[in-house]
Structures are given as C-alpha cells and as structure tokens.
Image (tube, coloured by chain):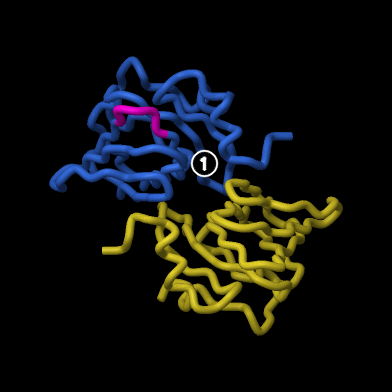
Chain colours: A yellow, B blue
Amino acid sequence: MKSKSLKDHFQDLEEYFFPKVIGEVNDTFIKVAKIKGDKIPWHNHENEDELFYIIEGSLLFEEENEPPFELNTGDFHIVKQGVNHRVSSREECKIMLIEPKSTLHTGDKKTEITRPISDQMK
Amino acid sequence: MKSKSLKDHFQDLEEYFFPKVIGEVNDTFIKVAKIKGDKIPWHNHENEDELFYIIEGSLLFEEENEPPFELNTGDFHIVKQGVNHRVSSREECKIMLIEPKSTLHTGDKKTEITRPISDQMK
C-alpha cells in the first residue's frame, strides 16, 4: 500500500521535471514532480487546465501576456487550457499537479525531458 | 484576484463542514473545508472518486469494511466511487478536496449540514 503522506512520494522521484502519478480521481491524475532548472519549454495544453500546488520551495511561473510571478510553499495556480506557460526554479521545488488524464507532459512541445504518461505511471 | 495561498482561502469559511470551491480543472472542482465534530453522515458518491488532502490538523477516516484510520497534515487519501465513508475530527481540521463537479456534498444522504454546489461556489 502506498504511503498516505504526499511528501513520501517524492522519494520515488529520481529525475527533475519527471512527474509521477500518485492517484486518480475519475478522469483526473494527481501527480508529484520536482523542478530544478529551466529545461521545461514554453508550451500549452490545448484542452486541459493544469493546477500547480507548491509542496516545498519556490517556482517561477511564466504565462503569455502576464508578468512573471513566483509561487511559494502552500501557493497554487491554475493554468487554463490553451495558455502558453513554463515554470522553472533555481533551487529544488516540490510540486503537486492536478490535470486531466489526457494532458501531455510538455503539451504541444517535445524535448529531452518529455515523458509519456506510461512512464509517469510506473 | 483570489490569493495564491491556499491557506488564505480558509478565511472565507464561516461554517464547519461547508466546502467552498477555490478552483476548477476541467470537470473537477478543487475545494477547501474545515471539519470539527462528527456531523457528516455515512454516505457514498455513486460515480465519483473523492480525494482528501490534509492542510492542517487530523482527520478520522472511516470507510466500509476497513478499520478506521487517521490522516494528518500532509496526508492524502482517495475514496473510490461507491464506497461508504465518513470523516470527523475532535479539533478543527483544514482539508482540500478534489472531486468531479457532479459530486454531491453528502452523496446519497441529506442532512442539516448538506450544501448544494451553488452555495459552495459563492
């Protein structure tokens, strides 16, 4: 049985930027990921909203047509479908993601960090 | 603009057991609620999974055919659709809920604490 503690699931994360599915709520995945650096490309998810919740650390958020802003521990932000965005962090940042199961990792872009959902579920 | 801090949203909660919608991810609602006491009846949601994440405090969880267990700050648990459950707490407990928009507050039961989704969105 998986741990009840959300933070414990970060122990399974070996790579930065690589989300892991920790739960399912009907058509929605709950994931955790750790971010360090700026390898995530600008991208969007045509049909999917995406919620970022900061478990620990700080995340620099960039969205098209908006000034950049920072999210800190306990903050959350929802990127609406179709909106170009990217996130980055100088120091390690632990996040929870809430998004439809159909969401592609880096949306309309594919780079060295992009992981298919099958790998996110291992 | 609503605050980025999830904890700030608890300031809008006047009543125990009364969830408030703080965000939408496609067909899913993100809610916060505070629990104190045992007024939530045993109930189930026929077609909806429901995730509980503990922001602050302790929550006693009861599910049919399982021994009761406690969730503490940082823990989460997903009740699968159709499973009878109830939660309670001696001291105030702050929780986040992730559930499909179609989820009824107290599922197949209706009591004095039951609130329609229209009130949860105010």
The amino acid type found where label 1 is placed reads Phe
Q: Which residues are magenta?
A: B89-93
Q: Secondary structure at mark 1?
A: strand
Q: Residue A21 in the image: x percent, y percent?
A: 45, 65
Which residue sits at x=57%, y=26%? B11
Image side of residue B41 versus residue B25, left or right: left
Image position, residue B20 (x, y; %): 52, 30
- Residue A99 visible in the current orientation: no
Measured along the vertical axis of the image, is residue A55 above or below residue B28? below
Residue A46: x %, y % from top left: 68, 61
Residue A111, compared with residue A73, is above or below; it is: below
Q: Find residue A6 and report its image quarter.
A: bottom left
- Asked if residue B94 shows in the view, the reply is yes
Q: Residue at x 62, y 47 (%)?
A: A76
The C terminus of chain B, quarter of image: top right
- Quarter occupied by residue A116: bottom right
Quadrant in which the N terminus of chain B appears: top right
